[in-house]
Image: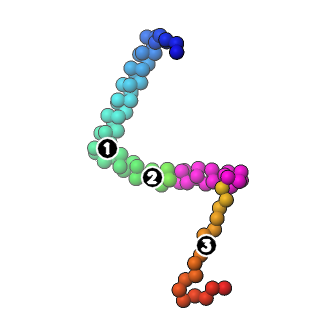
């Protein structure tokens, strides 16, 4: 494994990145404490779920097209009081 020297710019970049991350976390904790984070999550929950469901449907369609997944219809049991045809 090679020993790599780290330049001053890279060190400064890492420090700056850590400071930003710390500030983001601090702001998140403030939002969490006053309830605005929960309001935001409630507001965006439907949109996020729709996007995730669309991605899942696209992947499932791709798997079906490639033969990796075969959708199976559930076997319905006859219900009490009905006649099976």
- The answer to which of marks 1 and 3 sits earlier in the sequence is 1
The image position of residue 25, as x and y in percent, is: 35, 34
Tell me the distance, in whole angstroms, between the alpha carbons under discs 2 and 1: 16 Å
Q: Quadrant of residue 23?
A: top left
Residue drawn at (45%, 50%), measured in percent from left and top? 44
Residue indicated by mark 2: 45
Residue at far left of view: 33
* Left or right: 25 in relation to 85: left
Residue indicated by mark 1: 32
Q: Look at the numbered disc 2 and give the secondary structure of its residue.
A: helix
Would you place residue 32 above or below residue 78 in this image? above
* Left or right: 38 in relation to 49: left
Q: Look at the numbered disc 3 and give the secondary structure of its residue.
A: loop
The image position of residue 37, as x and y in percent, is: 35, 46
Residue drawn at (32%, 42%), measured in percent from left and top? 31
Tell me the distance, in whole angstroms, between the alpha carbons under discs 2 and 3: 34 Å
Residue drawn at (63%, 50%), measured in percent from left and top? 59
Would you place residue 44 above or below residue 27 in this image? below
Q: Which mark is residue 6?
A: none
Would you place residue 18 above or below residue 57 in this image? above
Which residues lie in the magenta part? Answer: 50-68
Residue indicated by mark 3: 75
- The answer to which of marks 2 and 3 sits earlier in the sequence is 2
Nearest-to-viewer mark from 1 and 3: 3
């Amino acid at each position: 494994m090679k020993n790599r020297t780290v330049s001053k710019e890279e060190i400064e970049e890492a420090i700056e990145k850590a400071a930003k991350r710390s500030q983001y976390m601090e702001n998140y904790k403030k939002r969490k404490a006053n309830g605005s984070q929960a309001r935001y999550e409630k507001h965006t929950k439907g949109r996020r779920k729709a996007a995730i469901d669309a991605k899942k449907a696209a992947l499932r369609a791709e798997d079906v097209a490639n033969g990796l997944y075969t959708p199976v219809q559930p076997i319905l049991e006859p219900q009490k009081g009905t006649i099976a045809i």
